[in-house]
Image: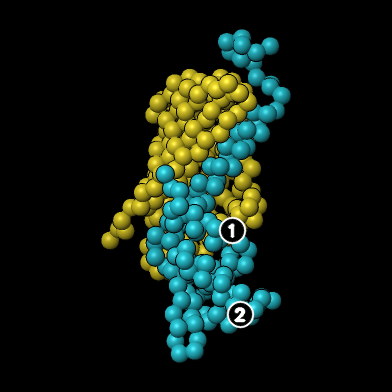
Chain colours: A yellow, B cyan
Amino acid sequence: MSLPVIHRGFAIERIYPTTPARVFRALSDPQKKRRWFAEGEGFEVESYTLDFRVGGFERTRFRPTGGPPMTTDAVYLDIAADERVVFAYAMTVGGAPMSSSLGTMELTPTASGTRLLFTEHTAFVDGQDGSEGRREGSLGLLEALAKELETHG
Amino acid sequence: MLQHSPLDRVFHALADPTRRAIAERLVAGPVSVSELAAPFSFTLSAIGQHVHLLESSGIVRSAKLGRVRRVELVPERLALAERWFVTHRARWERRLDRLGLLLAEPSDDQDPRGGQR
């Protein structure tokens, strides 16, 4: 029997001292997007593709060093140049579904640059089942979390 | 939206390396507080305080059996999900920080509308 889905949401805001057009290019240009979105986590990025248009896909294949393969697959739902990007995406860990999310990036010009507001609504599904798998899943998450906190405190 | 949520307590609890080590030790199974304390150079009462903080975040639970307090990881999926959400949000925080670093670099963009250069 499937476990109930757990829902959460969060929002993160940043002000960047540049124009909305330049921020938008960093969201839409595959080379730029790969650099800040996929690289730099201590993960090995096996592949990254971005087809930035409504209905287009963004696929990331990566793994923590020595860890299980992970995927992030997104589809773009709504794009307003220099203003807004809405996308849906799902993550898997070791082939098991972990989460499905709706993400929204909103760009607003401010006196000092551009305000970016990222809002996400997530359904956590955790495809693990059975106590042994759960224990391994817990261990993997703890290790991943410890690594992240050590690196970035 | 998530201020003062269980997430904050989980994040705080796992931000400390000793408490992370305790949580990782408990993945192998429940142990007594004195067994938990053995690898560390802390007093029993210091370890007890760490355990108490982990307990208040919902990551572990403990029960006294006679004179021994046994500690175990809370296996509930909710605790797992909360830890996952902490990691997930932190990942996005760092992504947006990296985006800021990228935007702080000298521009190599050719603005398609001729706005730059």
Q: Is residue B35 left or right of residue A58?
A: right
Q: Nearer the viewer, residue B40 or A61?
A: B40
For the residues labelled 2 and 1, say whether their Cβ atoms are less than 8 Å apart. no
Counting from the top left corner in percent of width and height, residue A50 is at 51, 31
Residue at numbered disc 1: B15
Give the image quarter of residue B65: bottom left
Q: Is residue B58 left or right of residue A27?
A: left
Give the image quarter of residue A77: top left
For the N terminus of chain B, the image quarter is top left
User: Which residue is farthest bottom?
Assistant: B66
What subunit carries mark 2? Answer: B
Whether marks 2 and 1 lie on the same chain = yes
For the C terminus of chain B, the image quarter is top right
What residue is rendered at 51% in x and 20% in y?
A82
Counting from the top left corner in percent of width and height, residue B95 is at 58, 39
Q: Assess disc 2: are there few (<14), some (14-19) or many (≥20) residues with their C-alpha within 10 Å of its C-alpha.
A: some
What residue is rendered at 59% in x and 74% in y?
B47
At label 2, the amino acid type is Leu
Residue A48 at least partly seen: yes
Residue at numbered disc 2: B44
What residue is rendered at 39% in x and 61% in y?
B77
Counting from the top left corner in percent of width and height, residue B40 is at 66, 75
Counting from the top left corner in percent of width and height, residue B51 is at 53, 72
What residue is rendered at 57% in x and 37% in y?
B96
Name the element at disc 1: loop
- From the viewer's perspective, is the residue at label 2 or at label 1 nearer? 2
At label 1, the amino acid type is Ala
Residue A129, relative to residue B26: is it above or below?
above
